[in-house]
Image (cartoon, grey):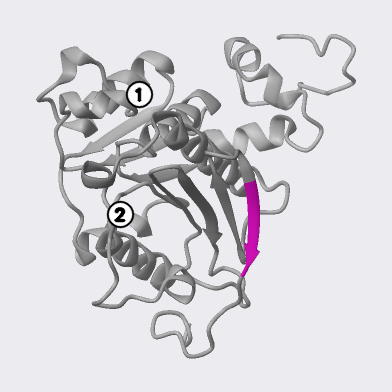
Amino acid sequence: MITSRGSGRDFSLCSMNDDQLLRYARHILLDEFGIEGQERLSAARVLIVGAGGLGSPAALYMAAAGVGTLVLADDDEVDLSNLQRQILHGQDRVGMSKAESGRRTLAALNPEVQVLPLLQRLDDAALLEWVANVDLVMDCCDNFATRHAVNRACVALRKPLVSGAAIRFAGQISVFDLRRDDAPCYHCLFPETDDIEELRCATTGVLGPLVGVVGASQAIEAIKLLAGMGEPLVGRLLCLDALTMQWQTLRYSRDPACSVCSKK
């Protein structure tokens, strides 16, 4: 068994083997994390909706951190124009399903993590089924319809949701955790309307590394929730302006008249 090297930690009751202790040593050394936090990650199941710009860094860091099971959902195929930012995929994967391409990349990074590729767009029924079988959901998609569908499923099943968005030079991250009675949902912050103008990377562009920053930030929030440490971004929207590299935090509250979560 690996020794604590003077750290004072007792590994005698640890369920991890020597290789795992070495792989995750830099997490275990964190007082707020420790062996208990790492074991929680190893037992966790996470649904990642979207294997594109946000889903790529989010999935890579979740796999590297040792999250036990990752369900990677995306019905799209890798396109040459994706490669400027979607780092799960390489040029040899053009034309391949993003979910399958992501599975191969994550398996190479950490073979201990089980990756389940979903090569489909998840409708309301499918979302309810998959969300019911995971501990946390990461919204890494690129459209409001899917975001609201994911939110409805998470609210219905009281599963924590880590949401990110990026367009042009602007990024946003927040956490919606309806396990807390006072927590707002995505619909409280961004009500679903028919007249909203939706911006797409394909028509407006996006700075490649920006999605890396946002996706990695989503991974931080997800790991905090799963390991039970820190203060998640519940009721706070973290915004980044990459042109000035300035961060801003906006606070928001639960909408008592919200059509999605007000009766939960």
Q: Position of residue 219 (x, y in %)?
A: 52, 39
* Depicted 5 relative to depicted 222: above or below: above
In the current view of this chain or complex, which residue is farthest to the bottom?
257
Q: Relative to 217, is 164 above or below?
A: below
**Where does the image place residue 60, in percent across and percent down from the top left?**
43, 27
Mark 2 or mark 1: whose residue is earlier in sequence: 1
Dot label at residue 87 = 1
One can see residue 95 in this view: yes
Give the residue displayed 57% in from the left and 79% down from the top.
254
* Magenta stretch: dominant secondary structure: strand
209 relative position to 94: left or right: right
Q: Amino acid at mark 1?
A: Ile
The residue at 42%/44% (across/down) is 46
Magenta stretch holds residue 248 = yes
Q: Is residue 62 left or right of residue 3?
A: left
State the residue in front, 195 or 115.
195
From the top left corner, tell me how far across and down residue 184 is, in percent: 54, 73
